[in-house]
Image (cartoon, rainbow, N blue to C red):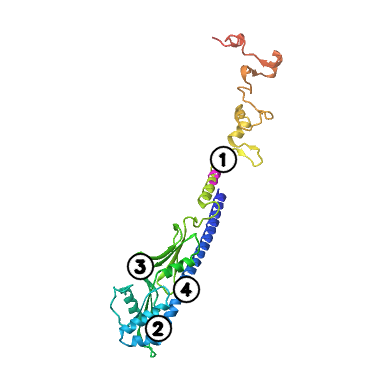
């Protein structure tokens, strides 16, 4: 019994270890896929960052932001916008800008002002982000600082891009039909904004998430329902345990039935061994009961002794008793007949009435 339980435990342990290993391998593969997709989305923005760096370093932009001629600045920005494919609007902004422009297309939002404030107060890289998501004015914002020759901050290059740039990059980097891919942007105290998504219905498993470099975005991937998700090949662990439990039950039942058999039992070779009261019956202490013993050889074994009452006889011979040898010689057949009338009468027996 203990051996069976131990075997079940070992099999369950090995099965669990194998399942964990395969699951970990699958998770590692999904992590690699999500990181690859995230990097490719980031790479799609790299040309825009490169051109923005060139624009910010140009003498014309430095001069425009050093002057107070806003009309000349706006005209220069419109001309430079042609260098950016999929650009919605290019702006050259003062470092102290603090007013939104809701009339613009797309508008200059409070989110952009917050990005400019952070860029003004730190030297950290300014990450691209989506603004006004899920609206007709949705756009991607990228910002570059502009310095003069002395390293003084003069202003910012503010670029608004179509979200389609990120969506197209996601489609190009998609790992296949069996994956549901989402490009997300975290939003404080609410669900993330989905910039774009591809693939079929996502499965119930938790998404594997990777950050998109130089942005506020993440890529989340899940296997689709059609793909079946991760499955452990072969027999399932619950079925394996059920089979093991059934074997343990059979072994336990067999042990219980053996224990119910008392002192008698069978040796491994198949011979019946009798002990205790059963041995007494075989030795003649209880004549006739040996016929009831299972496995008792009735052809070779005989009662070695009988009690004086029945002499081991049965049937009509129960009325006959073995008599002394002297009486046997007189009667001739060695049997005293007690069935006759004279034997049964009191006078014949010498008994006074």
Identify the residue at horizontal 69%, vertical 13% (top origin): 331
Position of residue 320 measured from the top left corner of the image (x, y, whole percent): 63, 17
Label 3's element?
A: loop
Residue 258: mark: 1
Which one is in front in this view, the residue at disc 3 or the one at disc 1?
3
> How would you rate the neighbour count of disc 2 (Cα within 10 Å): few for under 14, some for 14-19, many for 20 or more?
many
Residue 238 picture location, percent across and down: 50, 50
Query: Which residue is located at x 55 percent, y 41 percent?
Result: 259
Marks 4 and 1, the one that precedes in the sequence: 4
Q: CA distance from mark 4 to mark 1?
A: 75 Å
Q: Which residues are magenta?
A: 247-251
Indicate which disc, 1 or 2, sits on the residue closer to the N terminus.
2
Name the residue nearer the viewer: 102 or 277. Answer: 102
SS for callout 2: helix
The percent coordinates of residue 196 (x first, y second) are: 41, 65
Q: Residue at x 48, y 69 (%)?
A: 35
Q: Which residue is mark 2?
A: 56
Q: Secondary structure at mark 1?
A: helix
Residue linked to disc 3:
133
């Amino acid at each position: 019994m203990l051996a069976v339980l131990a075997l079940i435990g070992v099999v369950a342990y090995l099965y669990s270890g194998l399942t964990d290993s395969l699951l970990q391998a699958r998770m590692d593969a999904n992590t690699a896929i999500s990181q690859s997709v995230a990097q490719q989305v980031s790479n799609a923005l790299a040309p825009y960052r490169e051109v923005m760096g060139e624009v910010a370093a140009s003498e014309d932009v430095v001069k425009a932001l050093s002057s107070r001629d806003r009309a000349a600045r706006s005209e220069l920005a419109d001309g430079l916008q042609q260098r950016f494919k999929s650009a919605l609007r290019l702006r050259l902004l003062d470092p102290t800008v603090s007013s939104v422009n809701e009339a613009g297309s797309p508008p200059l939002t409070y989110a952009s002002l917050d990005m400019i404030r952070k860029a003004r107060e730190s030297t950290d890289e300014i990450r691209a982000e989506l603004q006004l998501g899920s609206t007709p004015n949705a756009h991607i914002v990228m910002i570059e600082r502009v310095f003069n020759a002395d390293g003084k901050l003069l202003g910012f290059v503010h670029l608004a891009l179509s979200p389609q740039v990120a969506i197209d990059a996601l489609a190009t980097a998609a790992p296949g039909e069996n994956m549901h891919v989402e490009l997300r942007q975290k939003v404080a105290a609410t669900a993330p904004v989905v910039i774009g998504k591809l693939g079929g219905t996502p499965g119930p498993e938790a998404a594997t998430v990777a950050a998109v470099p130089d942005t506020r975005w993440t890529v989340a991937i899940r296997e689709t329902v059609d793909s079946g998700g991760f499955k452990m090949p072969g027999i399932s662990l619950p079925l394996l345990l059920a089979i093991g439990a059934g074997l343990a039950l059979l072994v336990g039942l067999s042990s219980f039935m053996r224990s119910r058999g008392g002192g008698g039992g069978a040796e491994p070779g198949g011979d019946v061994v009798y002990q205790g009261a059963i041995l007494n019956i075989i030795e003649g202490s209880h004549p006739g009961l040996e016929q009831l013993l299972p496995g008792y050889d009735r052809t070779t074994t005989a009662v070695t002794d009988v009690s004086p009452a029945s002499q081991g006889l049965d049937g009509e011979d129960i009325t006959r008793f073995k008599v002394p040898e002297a009486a046997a010689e007189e009667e001739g057949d060695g049997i005293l007949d007690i069935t006759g009338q004279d034997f049964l009468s009191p006078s014949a027996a010498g008994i006074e009435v």
